[in-house]
Amino acid sequence: MEYSKLVEVYERISSTTKRLEKTFHISELLKKTPVEDLDVIVLLLQGKIFPAWAEKKLGISAKLILKVISKATGASVFDVENEWKKTGDLGIVAFNLIGKKSQQTLFSSKLSVKKVFENIKKLPELTGTGAVDKKTSLVAQLMTSAKPIEAKYIVRTVLEELRVGVGEGSLRDALVWAYFGESLGVRYDREANDIMLDAEKRRKYNEVVDVLQHAFDVTNDFSSVAKAAKKSGLKGLKEIKLAPGKPIKVMLCQKVEDVEEGFERVGKPARIEYKYDGFRMQIHKVNGKIVIYTRRLENITNQFPEVVDVIDKNIRGKEFIIDGEAVGYEPKSGRYLPFQNVSQRIKRKYGIDEMAKQFPVEINLFDVLYHDGKSLVKESLDKRREILEKITKQSSKKLVIAKVDYTDDVKEAEKFYKEALKAGNEGIIMKRHDSVYRPGSRVGGWVKIKPVMESLDVVITGAEWGHGKRSGWLTSLTVSIIGDNGEMLEIGKVGTGIKELEESATGGGITFESLTNMLKPLIISEKGKEVAVKPEIVIEVNYEEIQKSPTYASGFALRFPRFICLRDDKGKEDASTLNIVKEFFSKQRK
């Protein structure tokens, strides 16, 4: 397929804010896409080259793209950078300069989707001496053959900043429209911005959506789901199973105010567990090896050798997928520590054994999703817990099954809640005892209760260069949440809670200097003292209040936001959503 066909769709879906209209344009493209190009098209529609669970990352900086545009257009790097400062978007810079190129390539062949994809896919493989020049040449080769509008999206794809607003919901529904729409009677009415279905057809439509959603949930890969849908229809989707070695999104919780509301949501009796202030570990055993993933699907097996050892020795099974929480504790007292004390272990590459002694973790297991050839996600929580207890040999302060209270009594549940807080935990999680496991979902029979206003996980999308004693540091961080179409919506600026001095030996804080070092490679535009950065770093913040605000794209502003900690275990897709902010806003007014 010609790359220009995909670019036409990029332009159409970026020109509308209507989710259903985006869905329509994507579905029309998918209908025309041959099966051999389908996996590539589905990834590129998301602005990706690799599936979410793949360990390879592009990691291309804006500075390298300046060189690419210079090489492809003949303009000096100085001129390219000046154009960048004017527009704030290297995709637009490529569009403008390719359009002005004095000597157009006369006999360049039309770019295919596969050519663009394959060239970009090779970038992480280029390392060592001369790697920068090789990467520059590989992308410049595409730019030389590209039309201006194609160059715009090549640059954005390489920078992983597509900006067309394709969320998971739009892509999922587009697959349903493309491959099942005719049989379901789906007809998109642009004027009404709706699909015209009667009650019975709507019921069948929702059933197909659920089947496709489950297929995605257990693969975390829309490309394989699209191929199965196109080749084998519903039968093919239903045959897709959970598989060890491919991490999936973890199930999430909604927040409730108290135990009584918790029982209203999950029913009686309920399983009530400690809510630990740690980080999720999704533990797989495949081909005889233990592999550990964070909730953002990063492989952190090497950083936790002691966890690998204890899992291997104490959990029975040839293959499994287990969900749990790693909680740091003080070696002498055994008291649980806040997340930020052990978060530095996630990114650690050196001195791992010493870090394991200084910041040991206790693994608290609370769910099993797969065991010895059988997916358990559709089994009840009661059944999954029973299996987990049978296959696990517990070891104090190393590997334990999460403490649970099984009750229908409000007073007993409140007593358990107080015990959890006294032990140094964040609160409790109440679970519907017969709930299935719904990957990535906040609506599945799990709720959480914490004693303080719920913090938000926000993505850093901008900053300002500091002055005076903060000169040379990026300060006043612009932070964003996730909109309905997966876009980043600004919600405020954060400057307090970040240290000016060096981090303490115990890992008790993040400094402006360390944050600046993380953010500098992610800068995608600069205007005066303000910079925009690639949305990649997630931080946790608290605040005094959420206010309505016309200043920020989210429509809300955080009053007196304060940095709590860096969330290395979360990706931008794990950030708080606009719907969550609206919910918190409405509750604080009660």
Image (cartoon, rainbow, N blue to C red):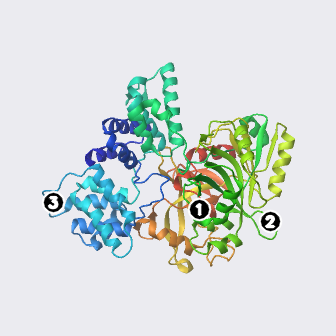
Q: Seen from this angle, which residue lies furthest bottom?
A: 469
Residue 341 image label: none
Where does label 2 land, which residue?
334
Disc 1 and disc 2: Cα gap in Å?
24 Å
* Image quarter hosting the N terminus: top left
The type of residue carrying mark 2 is Gly
Using the image, determine if residue 243 lies above or below residue 140.
above
Q: Is residue 461 left or right of 389 when viewed as pictured?
A: left
Q: CA distance from mark 2 to mark 3?
A: 68 Å
**Which secondary structure, mark 3?**
loop
Task: State the image coordinates of residue 305 (x, y, percent, origin top left).
Answer: 63, 65
Asked if one can make out residue 522 in the rendered structure from this viewpoint, the answer is: yes
Q: Is residue 192 visible?
A: no
Disc 1 versus disc 3: distance between alpha carbons? Answer: 48 Å
Other residues around mark 2 within 10 Å, as few (<14) / some (14–19) / many (≥20): few
x and y, in percent, of residue 574 in the image: 56, 52
User: Of discs 2 and 3, which sits in the foreground?
Assistant: 2
Q: Nearer the viewer, residue 212 or 521?
A: 212
First reached walking from the N terminus: tag 1 or tag 3: 3
Residue annotated with mark 3 = 105
Lower sequence index among marks 2 and 3? 3
Q: Nearer the viewer, residue 448 or 123?
A: 123
Callout 1: SS: helix
Q: Amino acid at mark 1?
A: Thr
